Image: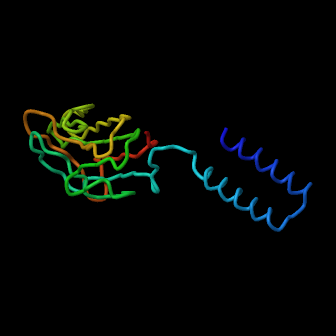
Amino acid sequence: MKFTSTLLLLVAVCHVILVDGGCTFKCSMVENILEKLFKSTGSDNCSHQKPKEIPAFSASMTNAKVLGATEILQFDKVWTNNGKDYDQNTGIFKAPFKGVYQFSFTVMSSNGKKLRVFLWHNGNRLVGVYPGIGYNEGTANIVLNLKKGDRVYVKCGGSDHGYIHTANGYWYSMFSGYLIHATK
């Protein structure tokens, strides 16, 4: 609506200039109007912050590991980390913007051992997988509404240890996420 009314005003001013003449003074006025028009329509007039780079990460585990009962998994082989919002030293993604995000993780249990892990959001357990015993994979996907600063991670969720299998060069276990769109 703002664009349409500004465009109509511009057409009316141009008509006055063409009919009345005096192009030198009035052409600069039209240039100023055009410049302001393009500045005001340069965005989609949203009041929320838009990312310059879409936050996205994907990381894998490089070594098999015995996990503590409440240990956060650290996916240390980083494939993508736009915005550097995933910390491979802690295994935690910290949301840089309020918005809708998609997360996914896949884990493989070790031969003859059990594994149960969950996706966590700010200390709250969400979706989980229990691949069973021995070289089985489990995958979970979820879409979340996050606030700026929210933390998302994968954590062992049993009362005992978990045994995760992976191998450098195969990367059976991984964690990824990305911003679908920022919100107000």
Q: Quadrant of the N terminus?
A: top right
Residue with the most extreme right position = 19
Residue 99: where, in percent of width, then height? 40, 40
Q: Quadrant of the C terminus?
A: top left
Q: Residue at x 24, y 44 (%)?
A: 153
Residue with the most extreme bottom position = 24
Residue with the most extreme left position = 160
* Number of marks drawn: 0
Quick check: 141 left or right of 159?
right
Here the colouring is rainbow
Rendering quarter of residue 104: top left
Residue 146: where, in percent of width, then height? 34, 39
Quick check: 134 left or right of 84?
left
Q: Nearer the viewer, residue 123 or 173?
A: 123
Q: Nearer the viewer, residue 15 or 84?
A: 15
Q: Residue at x 25, y 33 (%)?
A: 129
Rendering quarter of residue 168: bottom left
Q: Nearer the viewer, residue 115 or 70?
A: 70
Q: Residue at x 25, y 42 (%)?
A: 108
Q: Residue at x 13, y 40 (%)?
A: 162
Residue 68: where, in percent of width, then height? 9, 44
- Is 47 placed above or below 142 here? below
Q: Nearer the viewer, residue 61 or 52?
A: 52
Residue 33: where, in percent of width, then height? 70, 56
